[in-house]
Amino acid sequence: MTADLSQIVKAYDVRGVVPDQWDEGLAGLFGAAFAQVTGAHAIVIGHDMRPSSPGLSGAFARGAAARGVDVTEIGLCSTDQLYYASGALDLPGAMFTASHNPARYNGIKMCRAGAAPVGQDTGLSEIRALVESWLDGAAREPAAGTPGTITRRDTLKDYAAHLRSLVDLTSIRPLKVVVDAGNGMGGHTVPTVFEGLPLTLVPMYFELDGTFPNHEANPLDPANIVDLQARVRAEGADLGIAFDGDADRCFVVDENGDPVSPSAITALVAARELAKHGGQGTVIHNLITSWTVPEVVKENGGTPVRTRVGHSFIKAEMATSGAIFGGEHSAHYYFADFWNADTGMLAALHVLAALGGQDGTLSALVAQYDRYAGSGEINSTVDDQQGRLAAIRSAYEGQEGVTLDDLDGLTVSTADWWFNVRPSNTEPLLRLNAEARDEATMTRVRDAALAIIRG
C-alpha cells in the first residue's frame, strides 16, 4: 500500500485506521525496522482483542524474525501485561492496540528492554525514517543470514503474581467490586489477578470484543461509565472499577456510583507508596493534577515533582529522579516497582487494599484526597492555537498576584485558583483545566478562560 506515515506515526506510538491507513504489509516493515533500531537479539510481542490485532502482530513478528531476531509472542494481553513481559524478560516489546479508539483503529506501542518507552526522541522517528526509505525504494531492506524463531509463551499468571507481590490483599475485609471491562483486555486479566482474593467480583462486559458493542472503552468520557455507576448502586457494591480498551488505565467510582477523580487516586496511592518507602521518595505528577497531589506528597514526607503531560515525560522524569510513583489526570499510574511503566491494575489493587484495610466507605476514604473544585478537561476547537494562547497571556500578564508559566502550554495561577491551557499535538484543539478553592471561584475562572479561548 502507499502509506502516509505522518498520519499514523504519533508522538508516542503508531496509530491509524486499518486497512485504510496501514495494514499487515506495513506492520511487517515496522517489525523489521524495530528489530534494526533496537539492535535486539530477541523481542516480545502482545496484542489486544481487536479483529485486526492478531494479523498485524503476526506480520510484525515475521518482519522482525526475518532480520534474525527471536520473537516471543504472548498473545492476548493488556498493555501493562506486555510491559511486565518486557521488564521480566528484559526484552524490547511491541503491543498491538489502539487503546480506547474505535474498532477500526489499531496501533503499536513500543518499548525497549525493561519497558523503557519508545517515542519520537527515543527511536520512533528512526523507525519511521527506515520504513519510509524502504517504501519509496531509497533503501533496500537488509536481509538476515539466519531467520529468528517465533515462539509462544503465556505470561498472564506470572503478571498477576508479580502485581499481587507488590500489594498485599490477603488480609483485607471482604469487598464487593463491580468491574466494567468495556469488552476490552480487563476481561482477560481481572479474573486471574483477582482469583482467590477476598473479593466478590461482579463482572460487566468481560467478553473480549474489539467492536465494543456496549460502549466505547474510554472511561474518561462520563457517558461510558453510566452502566457501571448504575450497577454499583443496584448491587450495593463497595466500589466500581472501569478499565479502558487495553486496560492500562483504571477509573474508580465510589459506593454511591460517584466518580473518584484520578488526582484523588494519585494522592491516595502516593501516600501508600511513601509509607512503603519509609516516608521518603519522589512522586511525579503532571501539571494539571490537583493541588491536592503535591500537598499530600509533602504531608507524607515525599518530594513532589511537576512535569509536562504525557507518558514519555513522566517515565523520563521517573528514571532521572529515581521516583517511586507517578500519576496523571488521565488515570495513568506509573510505578518504580513496575519498571516505571503505567499499570491501571496495580493502581486498582492499591485502592482495594486501602479500602479493605479499614471499615469506612470509599467516599469517606477519598474525601481527604479531594480538597478542591476542578473543571475536568474541556476541549475547544480553535483556528489559531497560538493566537488564542497569546490572547490569554495578554489578559492576565502583569495582574497583581498572578503568575504565568510555560512548562506545557500556559498555566495561569494565583493563591486561590489556577488554570492551564495547552494545545493538542494532533488536532486543532485547546485543552483547558481549571481548579480553585471553591466551586464558585472555579466556575468564574473557567468561564473567563473559555470566553477568551472561544472568543
Image (spheres, grey):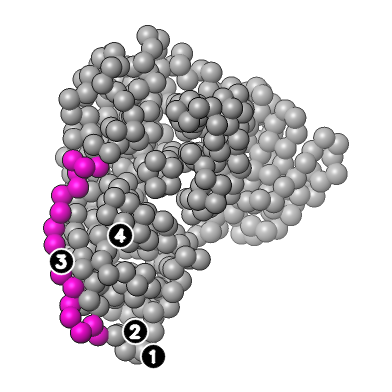
**Residue bearing mark 4:** 91
Which residue type does callout 4 highlight?
A: Leu
The numbered mark at residue 138 is: 1
- Residue 334 position in % (x across, y down): 44, 42
Marks 3 and 4, the one that precedes in the sequence: 4
Q: Are marks 1 and 2 in contact (CB under 8 Å)?
A: yes
- Residue 257 position in % (x across, y down): 37, 21
Query: What is the spatial separation of the Cα atoms under label 3 and label 4, in whole angstroms?
Result: 14 Å
Front label number (2 vs 4):
4
**Residue bearing mark 3:** 150
- Residue 197 position in % (x across, y down): 22, 23
Which residue type does callout 3 highlight?
A: Ile
Q: Nearer the viewer, residue 229 or 125?
A: 125
Q: Give the structural element (helix, strand or loop) at label 4.
A: loop
Query: What is the spatial separation of the Cα atoms under label 1 and label 2, in whole angstroms?
Result: 6 Å
Looking at the rendering, the stretch of residues picked out in magenta corresponds to: 143-159
The numbered mark at residue 134 is: 2
